[in-house]
């Protein structure tokens, strides 16, 4: 007996190779326009598809899961971070949520390094100057930045990406690495990355010349970096955020950058993406990227294939490998 293929909504365009595999295995509907879906489109999707494959641009708060009539049984999130989904509410509605850990570790850490270097060495400012035809030539005091080699890097969140960042900065730039992590990490494990665990976020902020955030967003991490914690950083320090925008109180960060409480920042993520406050965009001492952490062909394809594996397992009656609820 032929059973119908599960009906799947892919909320954005994905790498073609993955779209092809999904189309072979499932009855897929693609958001051809590649625009973010609004709340009502997502609420409809939950009532008309067996699986919905969202990304960070799709907000799925608790109330989209209420009201009954849900057909969706799995949300195969394209991304490791899933704080745009109220996973508790999804679970209560009987919907499984999966994510894509592991495959974006290297590329996200690479991007954090590039933001750290760009902020310290003012490469964004330099590029803007050259493009504007405003460069007046070499001089000893032109666009002086901060040396990276040998400095102290503070990492908040010592998971896969935090460790990859530590490895790059310790072995590549001879940096001293300190970190804060909610649970204890065995000292021998930390030592593999040239790193040392400190007891509190404040201990890390006080010690570090660069602070790089690698913890999940949402929940208790919302505004983990607030005005008081920015004030606890060294005045010459830099903040790097490739985690989630809401980990930093953006308003407090803008104030700190405007007043020179810290020296600079490198940001890939924002509180209300894709809106980036005008005051932030006006500052020279911040490097701003459009959420590119995992944006390589290899990684985005691998993320898509992880989603394929998760929903394939689920519809075969098996445990999805990356189930989060
Ligand atoms: C991730 O995987 O969390 C990326 O930030 C894209 O959502």
Image: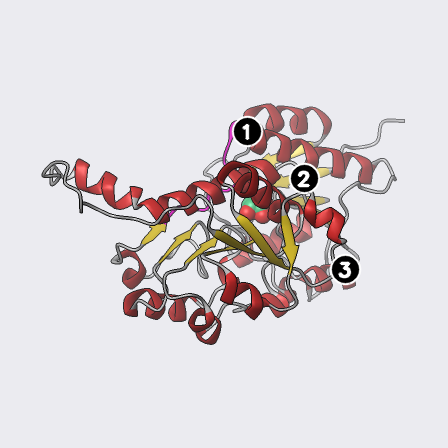
Task: Answer yes or no: is residue 263 visible.
Answer: yes
Task: Quadrant for the C terminus, please.
Answer: bottom right
Question: Is 275 on the left or on the right of 281, as rendered?
Answer: right
Image x and y of residue 274, in percent = 41, 53
Secondary structure of residue under mark 1 = loop
- Please identify the quarter of the rendering in which residue 124 is found: top left
Q: Main secondary structure of the magenta part?
A: loop
Kindly identify which residue carries mark 1: 15
Is there CB contact under 8 Å for labels 3 and 1? no
Residue range of the region highlighted in magenta in the rendering: 288-297
73 in the magenta segment: no
- As rendered, which of 1 and 180 lies closer to the eye? 180
Mark 1 to mark 2 CA distance (whole Å): 18 Å
In the rendered view, would you say 193 is above or below 214? above
- Please identify the quarter of the rendering in which residue 310 is found: top right
Kindly identify which residue carries mark 2: 102
Question: Is 264 on the left or on the right of 94, as rendered?
Answer: left
Task: Quadrant for the N terminus, please.
Answer: top right
- Please identify the quarter of the rendering in which residue 118 is found: top left
Question: Is 113 on the left or on the right of 167, as rendered?
Answer: left
Question: Is 169 on the left or on the right of 20, as rendered?
Answer: left
- As rendered, which of 250 and 183 lies closer to the eye? 183
Sequence-first disc among 1 and 2: 1
């Amino acid at each position: 007996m032929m059973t119908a293929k599960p009906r799947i909504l892919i909320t954005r365009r994905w790498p073609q190779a993955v779209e092809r595999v999904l189309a072979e295995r499932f009855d897929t509907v693609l958001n051809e326009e590649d625009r973010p879906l609004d709340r009502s489109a997502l609420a409809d999707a939950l009532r008309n598809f067996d699986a919905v494959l969202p990304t960070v641009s799709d907000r799925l708060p608790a109330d989209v899961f209420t009201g009954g009539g849900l057909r969706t049984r799995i949300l195969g999130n394209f991304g490791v971070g899933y704080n745009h989904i109220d996973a508790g509410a999804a679970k209560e509605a009987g919907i499984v949520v999966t994510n894509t850990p592991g495959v974006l570790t290297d590329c996200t850490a690479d991007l954090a390094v590039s933001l750290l270097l760009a902020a310290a060495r003012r490469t964004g400012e330099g590029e803007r100057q050259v493009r504007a035809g405003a460069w007046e030539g070499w001089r000893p005091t032109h666009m002086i930045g901060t040396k990276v080699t040998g400095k102290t890097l503070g990492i908040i969140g010592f998971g896969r990406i935090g460790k990859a960042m530590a490895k790059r900065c310790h072995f590549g730039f001879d940096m001293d690495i300190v970190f804060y992590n909610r649970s204890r990490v065995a000292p021998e494990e930390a030592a593999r990355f040239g790193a040392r665990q400190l007891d509190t976020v404040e201990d890390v902020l006080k010690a570090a010349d660069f602070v790089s955030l690698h913890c999940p967003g949402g929940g208790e991490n919302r505004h983990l970096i607030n005005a008081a914690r920015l004030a606890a950083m060294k005045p010459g320090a830099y903040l790097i955020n490739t985690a989630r925008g809401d980990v930093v109180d953006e308003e407090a960060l803008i104030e700190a950058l405007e007043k020179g409480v810290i020296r600079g920042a490198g940001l890939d993520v924002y509180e209300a993406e894709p809106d980036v406050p005008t005051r932030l965009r006006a500052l020279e001492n911040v490097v701003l990227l459009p959420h590119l952490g995992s944006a390589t062909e290899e990684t985005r394809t691998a993320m898509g294939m992880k989603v394929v594996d998760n929903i394939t397992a689920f519809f075969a009656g098996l445990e999805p490998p990356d189930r989060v609820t």
